[in-house]
Amino acid sequence: MKFTLSWLKAHLDTEAEVDQVAEAMTMAGLEVEEVHDPIAALAPFTVAKIVSAERHPNADRLQVCQVETVDGMKEIVCGAPNARAGLTTIYAPIGAYVPGLGVTLVEKPVRGVVSNGMLCSASELELSDESDGILELADDLQVGEPAAGVFGAEPVIDFEVTPNRPDWLGVAGIARDLAAAGLGQLTTPEIVPVAGAFDSPVSVALEAPELCPVFAGRVIRGVRNGPSPEWLQQRLTAIGLRPINRLVDITNLISYDRARPLHVYDLATLSGEGIVVRAGRGEADSLVALDGKTYAPGAADCVITDAGGQRAIGLGGVMGGVSTGCSDETVDVFVESAWFDPIATAQTGRSLGINSDAQYRFARGVDTASVVPGLELATQLILDLCGGEPSTVTVAGQAPAAPAAFAFDPAYVKRLSGMDLSDDRIFEILFALGFTVMRGSPWSVTPPSWRRDIEGRADLVEEVARIEGYAALPDAPLPPVAPAPGGVLSPRQARVRTARRSLAAMGYAEAVTWSFTKQSIAALFGGGDERLVLENPIAADLDCMRPSVLPNLIQAAARNAARGHADVALFEIGPIYLDDQPNGQRTVIAGLIAPHADRHWGGEGEDPLFALKGDLMTVLEEIGAPVGSLQLAQGANRDWWHPGRSARLQLGPKNVIVEFGALHPRVLKALDADGPMLAFEVVLDSVPEPRGKSGKARGAADLPNLMPLTRDFAFLMDEAKAVGDLTRAVAGADKALIADVRVFDVYRGQGVPEGQKSVAIEVEIQPRAATLAEAEIEALTAKVKAAAAKAGGTLRA
């Protein structure tokens, strides 16, 4: 919605400048998008007079003009066909920015003759679309007079209208709110009814009152149509509308001035003596609208017809038809002022793809009480600008009932907003906004017909606060509230937090998935029992409590792979539900990697299974699990693990803490996931809590000051025996001196008996008191061999 400052001042007596108006609008709740000042854009342009115009020596279509300008006599090359001696026009000097061309003028030759400026057309100044020649102005204008003053340029305010305020679609509605806010005095002229000289020969019949409850009209005979007066053209042009003729321009003016759309029919083109308003009949009502397009309104669309309802001549509340449009030859007219249902009008615009000014306003709700007053205002303007003789007003139907009154206690303003206003001030604001207020105990307030968005007392408080100004809202600080005592994490909560941070630090991304899965998927992971099936699932594929977090992580990894991110590392900490134990809920820490690194000439590198195990051991150490006491058992107890690439960590045969390894290809295929995928699942409930710490402070760090040394050993052991058992046995041979034991090679082949493997380990020895003698090293070596023998390892020759 746009309007000029002078247009606003036709309704508001104020001395405020455009910036003050924009500020007051913003404070009153109107969202100002832009204030366009064409005066600044036209500042370089002034009136000039062509003294002589001679043909260009090197171009037949160009003329070399001697022009009297504000800068003195200038030689300017011009290609306009109407450039001639004695013509008064607009001059642009070198350095001026021409908005219609988007260029800044520079001094350069045109076919060998230097042009010292430019003579402008209307389109080059963005005054209109006319570009056939340069502007032709009145001869009495003085050379050097600013172009902004010649064309009556003035600032234009552009603002956004919220759907609940259709009254802001008229300048009068904006002036009303600004007057209530104290910016000036409301001076909107009162509409005076025009007496009819004869009975209207056009009758109106409403066959679809649900689409059009009320329809008013009158005939005006003997009008003289043609171009509108300069003031009306300038007012419409300033807001981006193209003047057409007096009759059409009057309807556009009232639409933007009072938010009241109207339509004018050429009476000579109407068939019969009546208008019928009814629902559309599809292709039978096909009509060419004023936008030149053909539409076939359906049963949900309102159609204006003549000739007894047979010929469609317009789309009610949206657009008129070409067949009954007004031209310069129009003599007698029928003026329409109706009220169309907002929802039906909005649906018509969407279904037919039309977004006209009338549809925009009717869809938001035009003032129901403006039907006849809008017709009277249009009549007076037509008589003033076109002449003619009006008939009486014909009204069919009845406008929707006015908003009902409701009780309002003015004390509610302070209770809801905190503003301490007197009853008189509250009454003054509501009265200025058009509300009818009956003071009593409580008050009775009736919203005006143009404010159907007001439905209760809270709406009134908002209106009072908006007009009084949100700057008046109290800024008292809230009462101090003592902080709530900080909670202490339980050991399990602390472990969960530690595990989450540890996995995130290692590059895993946390996934938050449902605690449900599909029953058939649960069956793949040892679940799916009827006791865990939901009676009222949120989705058909989430009908069972999950027995493991892994299926959800597998599906999450598959979704990432489908979107081009196959190499992922995910983890989730949450509950699982088992049907084979009395208390079936367990908390687990689950991680999954899908190793799909880019191919490289150097090979695949480290086996990702060992990397996964390293991450798992790090997490277990972080949460305080007894890592040194855990037993590694080959293979997992569950059939969703790969039998040859999986293992478990346990404290005895019955207390399995972790299962980890590669997931079985059969399971991945069932979940539509591409392998390989490796995972682990830690049952947090099975991890013993660390012993309580004493209150003693930690002692000084015991850092050795001697260099460590290493010794390598190769042991033969049965293929079925776990390498971890060997390393643990060796590490325990002498806990005071052996700092670490690392496996660096496992060999099977020539020289190794069938059914055995050669395990090469590196033992790191850390002296403490003194450098070890050869005899001490030999004694330690003997201890290592003895410990390895107990674990089933024989030193390889």
Image: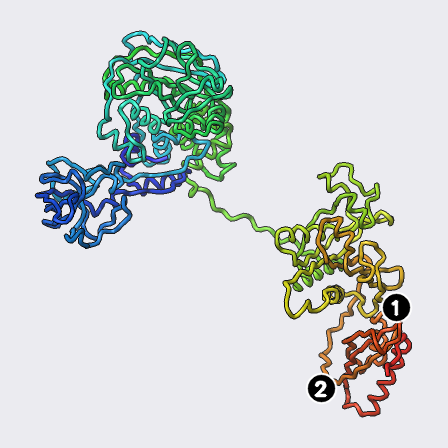
Q: Which residue is mark 2?
A: 705
| Residue 125 place in picture, x, y as percent | 24, 42
| Label 2 environment density (alpha carbons within 10 Å; few <14, some 14–19, many ≥20) | few
Q: CA distance from mark 2 to mark 1?
A: 41 Å
The mark found on residue 720 in the picture is: 1
Residue 373 seen from this side: no
Q: Give residue 753's quadrant in the image.
A: bottom right
The mark found on residue 404 in the picture is: none
Tag nearer the camera, 2 or 1: 1
Instruction: Give me the residue at 16% from left, 51% from top.
Output: 115
- The secondary element bearing badge 1 is classed as loop
Residue 748 seen from this side: yes
| Label 1 environment density (alpha carbons within 10 Å; few <14, some 14–19, many ≥20) | few
| Residue 759 place in picture, x, y as percent | 82, 76
Q: Amino acid at mark 2?
A: Asn
Q: Give residue 509's quadrant in the image.
A: bottom right
Q: Is residue 571 above or below residue 408?
A: below
Looking at the image, is mark 2 or mark 1 earlier in the sequence? Answer: 2
